């Protein structure tokens, strides 16, 4: 069950890289239209400095990539803890649900970006993560008590 538990995390890592590439290609394509020359940018310019220079639809991809570097940082160690201590079928379903919801959230935010749907996807994925976190805590506590589950 360890590999089955780790597979969703590997997929979310790959998806994060897809979003990184989508962000880069979208941004670089918009630079010319916005009259931004990369070779003339002042030192220290960051992505956030582009907010008022690039169209919102371009920045949505970047915002989502940032989101994939935030909450999933809790997901990854939670998955590892559960994989090490013994994943069950519910854990695996929650992991896949979390990843599927994050991918749909990414696609929604990068293309449509209406808040009610995006928020709903976020809440649902967070619910999966809360369930996984509770399971990780229970597994670690029971392991510390001699394997009582």
Image (cartoon, rainbow, N blue to C red):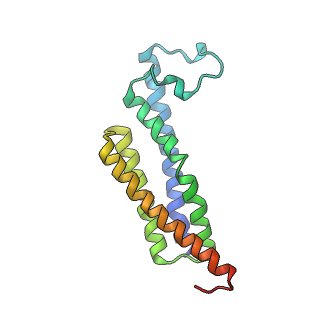
- Looking at the rendered structure, the number of numbered marks drawn on it comes to 0
The one of 86 and 118 positioned closer to us in this rendering:
118
Q: Position of residue 77 (x, y in %)?
A: 61, 61
Q: Position of residue 123 (x, y in %)?
A: 39, 55
Decide: is 2 above or below 110.
below
Vertical order, 26 against 146 (above or below): above
x 45%, y 21%: residue: 52
Please state, as top left, top right, bottom left or bottom right, where the C terminus lies in the image.
bottom right
Image quadrant in which the N terminus is located: bottom right
Q: Residue at x 45, y 75 (%)?
A: 90
Q: Which corner quadrant of the image does residue 108 belong to?
A: top left
Depth check, front residue: 23 or 68: 68
Q: Nearer the viewer, residue 11 or 48?
A: 48
x, y (%) of residue 82? 58, 71
Which quadrant of the figure has residue 136?
bottom right
Q: Position of residue 68 (x, y in %)?
A: 51, 47
Q: Is residue 142 above or below residue 115?
A: below
Q: Is residue 145 left or right of residue 109?
A: right
Residue drawn at the location 58% of the way across and 53% of the way down: 73
Q: Residue at 69% across / 86% down in the picture?
A: 146
Q: Is residue 103 above or below residue 97?
A: above
Q: Indicate left or right for 6 with 94 as reference.
A: right
Is 62 displayed left or right of 144 in the figure?
A: left
């Amino acid at each position: 069950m360890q590999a089955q538990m780790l597979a969703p995390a590997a997929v979310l890592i790959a998806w994060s890289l897809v979003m990184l590439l989508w962000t880069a290609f979208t941004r670089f394509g918009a630079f010319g239209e916005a009259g931004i020359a990369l070779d003339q940018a002042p030192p220290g310019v960051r992505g956030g400095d582009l907010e008022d220079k690039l169209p919102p639809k371009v920045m949505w991809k970047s915002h989502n990539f940032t989101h994939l570097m935030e909450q999933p940082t809790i997901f990854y160690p939670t998955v590892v803890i559960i994989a090490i201590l013994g994943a069950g079928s519910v854990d695996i379903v929650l992991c896949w649900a979390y990843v599927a919801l994050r991918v749909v959230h990414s696609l929604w935010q990068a293309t449509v970006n209406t808040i009610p749907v995006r928020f709903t996807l976020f809440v649902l994925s967070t619910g999966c993560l809360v369930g996984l976190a509770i399971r990780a805590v229970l597994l670690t506590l029971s392991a510390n008590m001699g394997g009582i589950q």
